[in-house]
Image (spheres, helix red, strand yellow):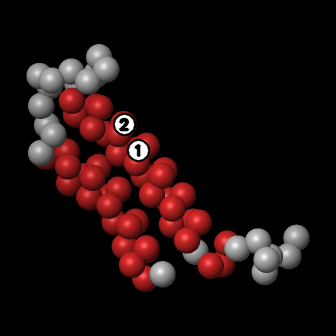
Amino acid sequence: MGYVRWLAVLPFLGILGGVFFANRVTPMVLGMPFLLAWIVLWILLSAGIMALIYRSDPANRSEGRRP
C-alpha cells in the first residue's frame, strides 16, 4: 500500500513541474495552446490516479463498512 500513496505525487509533479517544460504556444492541441492542453491532460490524469489510489486502499472495501 505504501507505493500506491506515492502515486499522489505524480499530479503535483505533472501540473506544477511540467509547466516549465511545456511552456510553449506553437503546437496547438485540439485548438488549445500546448500549455493549456498539458494542464487539462494532467487534471484528467489526476482524477484517474486518485481513483486508482481509492480502489487500492483496503479501508474502502465494502465488506467491512457499516451504513
Q: Residue at x 12, y 45 (%)?
A: 21
Which residue, given by chain and number where applicable, does mark 2 sit on? 40
Which residue, given by chain and number where applicable, does mark 1 sit on? 43
Secondary element type, mark 1: helix
Q: Are marks 2 and 1 in contact (CB under 8 Å)?
A: yes
> Residue 11, relative to residue 19: is it above or below?
below
Query: Which amino acid is tagged 2?
Result: Val
Quadrant in the picture for the C terminus: bottom right
Between marks 2 and 1, how big is the CA–CA gap? 5 Å
Q: Residue at x 40, y 44 (%)?
A: 43
Quarter of the rendering containing residue 41? top left
Secondary element type, mark 2: helix
Q: Position of residue 16 (x, y in %)?
A: 25, 52
Instruction: Give the farthest residue toward the right.
Output: 67
Q: Residue at x 29, y 17 (%)?
A: 31
Q: Position of residue 8 (x, y in %)?
A: 40, 65
Please count the marks in the image: 2
- Describe residue 63's horizontal placement relative to residue 24 as left or right: right
**For mark 2, does the 10 Å Cα neighbourhood hold few (<14), some (14 to 19), or many (20 or more) residues?**
some
> Residue 55, relative to residue 29: is it above or below?
below
Query: Which amino acid is tagged 1?
Result: Ile
